[in-house]
Amino acid sequence: MKRIYMDHSATTPTDPLVVEAMLPYFTEKFGNASSLHFFGQEAAEALEQSRKQVAYLIGARPEEIIFTSGGTESDNLAIKGIAYQNSGKGKHIITSVIEHPAVLNTCAHLEKDGFEVTYVPVDSDGILDVAELENAIRDDTILITVMHANNEIGTIQPITEISKISKEKGIYFHTDAVQSVGKIPVDVNELGVDLLSISSHKIHGPKGVGALYIKKGTLIQAIAHGGEHEARLRAGTENIPGIVGFAKATTLAKERLAVDSKHLTELRDLLIKKVLDSIGHSYLNGHPTKRLPNNANLRFSFIEGEAMLLSLDMKGIAVSTASACSSRSLEPSHVLKAIGLRPEDAHGSLRFSLGKDNTREEVDYVVESLAEVVRKLRDMSPLV
Amino acid sequence: MYSEKVMEHFSNPRNVGEIEDADGVGRVGSPSCGDTMDIYIKVKDGIIADVKFRTFGCAAAIASSSMMTEMAKGKTIEEVLEITRDDVADELGGLPEAKMHCSNLASDAIRAAIEDYLEKQSHKKDNSR
């Protein structure tokens, strides 16, 4: 049976070149970067070289990069780090209603700790309302955190517009760029952000590693305490093999960005067009053009996402759903709710997230299979 | 995540459809909570002679509906009313904790269909008086 992976927003296969770059750092170059001897210095050199590579991807300086265990830790460090550092100035944070749980639950945690959080709504395309955000700013606002691109519906947020406002008002601005890096240009200077989170395994790097960009001069508090690693902001012996692999992945992503992004956009548009043309009562969630080149979030009336996902899985196709039935909480997706979908429509949504190795033939096969699956489930549905 | 039995019933559900001149119809759940089940029954001499379903929901909901119809077919009304919510899940080789409500829904649906049948029967009796 064919096996087709269209769930690249969940994770990506590690590039063989990345694996190759990592291998020596498990064995002969195993040193601890904090050690003064030869073994340690070899690791320290690899660490600093990696920092340069990651910085280069996003137009930052090497000293502005802190390595972490991934996107979630980067978001935690950015948000808690700014909040605790600036709690004397104010305790108000602004975010959006469609953030990743790494941001939403960090904010919820801070709310228990005496901070106040305003959640700015989005329109029916999933784009943040900048005027609402501006209205939400108070004298005690210390941080704005808004994602660059949404992980479920792929909509790209007006980050430069927000950063103009944050600069004017002197408020720190963090963005979670975990989904956008490697798919669209991400340059910290162009975006005008103070902090930016990235993850390795979304860009064909290994899991368990990521980075936080912290603009020079931005003070934050550490959230994990221990040794003096990573400018004393992230204690713990550095994951050198992971960091080297992540760095290699960023270099490859930078080299391939133009080609990959064109290829992904073509496949995405082909997939969307074919689905909307060939399957009745199917709709695109999110903005038609202001979306990640690799994201197609589609919904199908009268049927449920988990049933669709498992039926596709049996045909060798891997996608994802934000249907409540696939979550432990049985709550519908907060993102689909935020763009105004009725619960039953949110239940019937699937996310196809493409990767550089997907082909037009795969898209054809996926649409054919999907049409069959939708037909079969609708034949069973009392709602048709 | 799911047992083989669940996946088998989900892939090849039994008794899908509706019965046009059904003796009893039960609908439970609501689209907004992610599951809706319609169950149709045909009763002959106190026995469930035929049963069909339509379900909007996840794999567990579809498999539970399918299993419920198989369990009910050919049984007396009294026997079917004795089928508990857990029985459906047990017959399916178990369901994940978060999915237990799906099997509950299936047993609720057939109960609703039987109640509908019994109510119609009592109306018939009333009318014949």
Image: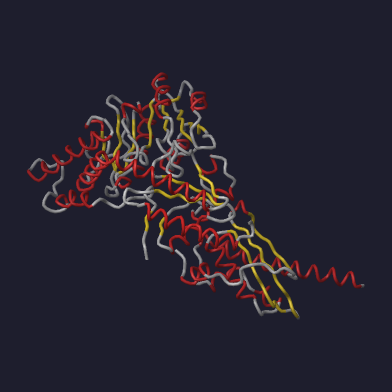
Image-based side of A3 in relation to A153, left or right: left
Query: Relative to the observer, which residue lies in front, B14 or A82?
Result: B14
Colouring convention used in this rendered image of the protein: secondary structure
Does residue A147 appear left or right of residue A18 in this picture? right
Locate residue A161, reporting x and y percent. Answer: 42, 25
Question: Looking at the figure, which quarter contains the N terminus of chain A?
Answer: bottom left
Give x and y (percent) for residue A342.
59, 46
User: What is the residue that sits farthest to the left in this orientation?
Assistant: A38
Seen in the picture, residue B116 relative to A89 is either above or below; the reply is below
Q: Quadrant of residue B65?
A: bottom right
Residue at image location 33% in from the left, 27% down from the top = A190
Q: Which quadrant is home to the C terminus of chain A?
A: bottom right
**Percent coordinates x, y for residue A321 in the rendering:** 47, 52
- Residue, x 59% and y 59% (percent of image)? B56
Q: In screen coordinates, is A166 left or right of B116?
A: left
Q: Which residue lies at the image location 57% right of the left edge and 40% below the top edge?
A: A340
Q: In this rendering, is residue B23 above or below B102?
A: below
* Rendered residue at 27%/49% (across/down): A206
Q: Residue furthest top?
A: A168
* Vertical arrangement, residue A290 with respect to residue B59, above or below: above
Q: Position of residue A195 (x, y in %)?
A: 34, 31
The quarter of the picture where residue A229 lies is top left
**Number of residue marks:** 0
